[in-house]
């Protein structure tokens, strides 16, 4: 990542920010003085991470608790809560996979699971870009990072739905960089 860019901007938005890679990004960029909007599912976990970042790095935080498997109402809420913020970095990190590898037709819970996977892995990236990128284009600065997976490059027959989705995220990454 090119850190000169971050000197020009001061708010980052991270999805899936209360744990794992998203939390690590939040800590890393807070250390550089960026204020953070943390978006994730569990309010208590978000609040803990936010308080920790404020205390350690003297940055401002905002938390938005939503479930990205919900495709309908959450984006209106996110859009409303991000209105007026000059966002410089969007990190599309939230993602989910199968509970265990399974052949496409043999997954007993496939309707529900595949819908959730598409909502969380694909809708989230598309809709977050739709909400955040217009402001970046207007200000002529901004960075969108889409976290993908090596599963986009390695055919995995028992994770088919996940594999094509992480591949989509890489293609959308090109779109993000292309626009901003
Ligand atoms: N870790 C790896 O080895 C690996 C490898 C390849 C790719 N990736 C990709 O990297 C990204 C992050 O992975 P990770 O392992 O760091 O994830 P993680 O540790 O499982 O953290 C997931 C984060 O996303 C949030 N989240 C999960 N489902 C959600 C939902 N439906 N709605 C809202 N928030 C939700 C969790 O919030 P709660 O705690 O509140 O549920 C948590 O903050 C994912 O896109 C993943 O596909 C990871």
Image (cartoon, rainbow, N blue to C red):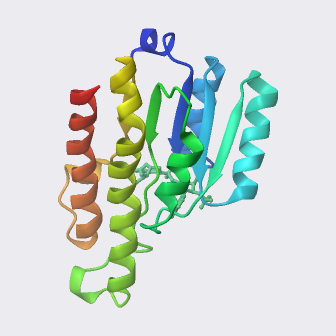
Taking depth in this image into account, of 15 and 31 the one nearest to the observer is 15
Residue 85: x percent and y percent?
56, 30
Q: Residue at x 77, y 30 (%)?
A: 54
100 up-or-down from 84: above or below: below
Count the labels in the image: 0
> Residue 180 occupies which quadrant of the picture?
top left
> In the image, is 178 to the left or to the right of 30?
left
Residue 27: x percent and y percent?
63, 31
Taking depth in this image into account, of 51 and 24 the one nearest to the observer is 51
43 up-or-down from 158: above or below: above
> In the image, is 154 to the left or to the right of 143?
left
> Residue 174 occupies which quadrant of the picture?
top left
129 up-or-down from 101: above or below: above
Taking depth in this image into account, of 39 and 134 the one nearest to the observer is 134
Q: Residue at x 77, y 47 (%)?
A: 48
Viewer can see residue 156: yes
Q: Residue furthest right?
A: 55
Taking depth in this image into account, of 152 and 137 the one nearest to the observer is 137
Viewer can see residue 16: no
Q: Residue at x 39, y 19 (%)?
A: 139
Residue 76: x percent and y percent?
49, 56
Q: Residue at x 47, y 69 (%)?
A: 70
> In the image, is 14 to the left or to the right of 139?
right
Residue 34: x percent and y percent?
61, 22
């Amino acid at each position: 990542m090119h850190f000169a860019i971050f000197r020009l901007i001061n708010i980052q938005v991270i999805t899936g920010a209360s744990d794992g890679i998203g939390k690590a990004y939040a800590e890393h960029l807070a250390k550089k003085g960026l204020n953070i909007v943390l978006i994730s599912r569990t309010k208590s976990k978000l609040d803990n991470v936010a308080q920790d970042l404020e205390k350690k790095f003297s940055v401002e935080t905002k938390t938005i608790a939503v479930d990205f498997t919900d495709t309908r109402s959450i984006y209106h809420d996110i859009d409303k809560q991000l209105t007026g913020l000059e966002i410089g970095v969007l990190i599309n990190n939230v993602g989910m996979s199968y509970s265990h590898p399974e052949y496409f037709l043999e997954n007993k819970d496939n309707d529900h699971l595949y819908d959730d996977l598409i909502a969380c892995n694909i809708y989230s990236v598309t809709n977050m870009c739709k909400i955040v990128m217009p402001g970046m284009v207007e200000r002529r600065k901004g960075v969108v990072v889409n976290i993908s997976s090596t599963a986009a490059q390695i055919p995995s027959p028992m994770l088919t739905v996940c594999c094509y989705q992480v591949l989509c995220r890489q293609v959308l990454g090109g779109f993000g960089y292309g626009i901003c």
